[in-house]
Amino acid sequence: MIGDKQRPMLRFLIVQSTASVVGLQGWMILFNNFAVEEAGLNGQQIGMLGSIREVPGFLALLAVFVLLVLREHRLSALSVTLLGLGVGLTGFFPSYSGLILTTLIMSFGFHYYETTNQSLTLQYFSTAVSPLIFGRLRSLAAATSILVGLLIFLMGQSLSYRTMFLVIGALVTAAGIWGLWQDPTHRNLAPQRTEMVFRRQYALFYFLTFMSGARRQIFMAFAVFLMVKVFAFSVTEITLLFVVNNAVNFFLSPAIGRAIVRFGERAILSVEYAGLIVIFLLYATTESRWVVVALYILDHILFNFAIAIRTYFQKIAEPGDIAPSMAVSFTINHIAAVVIPAIGGALWMVDYSIPFVAGAVMSLISLVAVQRIPRLKRA
C-alpha cells in the first residue's frame, strides 16, 4: 500500500500533524475560558476574533507565491513553528487587542500547515490510499487531542493560563524546528504549477469548499462559546469533553476513510450534511447540557466526513494542479468564514439560536449540491 519512497513523507506528516493538533487543540481548550475569565470578552468580540482567526485562511492562496522561493515541506515545517509561537504567546496578552495579535500569528501557522499537509498527502499517495492516510492522520489527531486534554487537565490544577499556553507552544515549536531539518521528498512526482489555478471542471469542488467553510465557522466560533456562556461549562468540563470526543474519533476516523473508498464521496457527504441539519437545529433549541455534549461529539464525527471533498478533487484534478488548488481552496473555504463569525456574533446578541439556524440552512444547501458528484472509480 505504501512504498519505501513514501514512508519518509508519511513520517514527516505524522510528526507535523501531531504538533499542529497539539497547538490547535490546546489553544481551543483554553481559549474560550481564557477570553471570558481573563480578558473579559463578550459574544460580539468572540465573533470578531473568530473572523480575524480566519483571515490567514483567506490569504492561503499566497502560499502559491511563497512556494516560488521555499519548498513545500519547508513551508509546512515553518508553519508549524509559527503556530507554536502564536500559542505560546497567547497567555501573555489577556486583552482584546492582544488576542487579535496572537490569534493571527497562531492562525497563519495553522492554516498554512493545513494547506501544505493536504497538498503533500494528495501528491504522495494515490486515490485508493489517500482516504486511508487522511483517516489515519485524523485518528492520530484524535489520540493526540486526548493527551493534550489530559495534559491541560493536570496542568490546570496548579498552573496559570499563561504557563499552560507557554508549555503547549514550546512543544509545537520544537516539532516545527525538527521538521525544518528533514527532507522527506522524492523526485518522481508531477511538477506543481506555481500560479493560482481556477478551472471550470472544479466548480463543484469550489462550491462545496465554500459552503463547508461557511457553516463550519458557525460551529467553531459559537459551539464551545455556547457551552461556556449559556450552559456555564467550566474549563475542566470543556477539557473532559475534548477527551471523550477525541476518544470516539480515534476509533471512528480510520473507518471513515475506509467508508469513502467503499461507498464513494457522494454517499459520505450526503450523510454528513443530513446529520448537520439536525445538529444545528438542536443547538438552536435545546436546553439540556447533555444534549449539547452529544451534539458536539456528533458534529466532530461528521466533520471527518469532509475528507471526501478533498478526495473527490483528487479524482478529477490534473496532477500538477494539486498544490496551487489546495492553496486556492483554502482561500475559498475562508471567504465566508472571515465575515460569518462577526455577523454571527452580532446576531448572537439578538438571539443566540440565530447563527445555528443559519448553519442548518447552509447544510441543506450543501446536501442538495453533493448530489451532483458523479460516481467515479479510484486509481
Image (cartoon, rainbow, N blue to C red):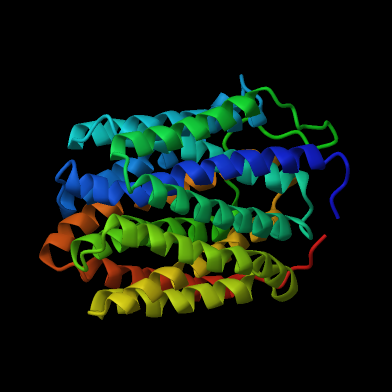
Residue furthest out toward the top = 69
Q: Answer with the quarter of the image where residue 218 lies.
A: bottom left
Which residue reaches farthest right?
4
Residue ID at (47%, 79%)? 274
Position above or below: 275 against 118: below
Q: Nearer the viewer, residue 282 or 62?
A: 282
Residue 321, image x and y in percent? 67, 42
Q: Residue at x 40, y 64 (%)?
A: 241
Left or right, 60 with respect to 11, comes to: left
Task: Give 316 or 259, whichever is nearer the viewer.
Answer: 259
Q: Closest to the observer: 236 or 53?
A: 236
Coordinates of residue 349 in the picture (x, y in percent): 12, 60
Whether residue 327 is visible: no
Query: Which residue is depicted at the point 51% across and 73% down?
Result: 272
Residue 333 higher or lower than 53, as above or below:
below
Task: State the image coordinates of residue 166 (x, y, percent, origin top left).
Answer: 39, 32
Residue at (30% x, 55% y) in the render:
235
**Quarter of the rendering occupied by the N terminus:** bottom right
Q: Is residue 167 visible?
A: yes
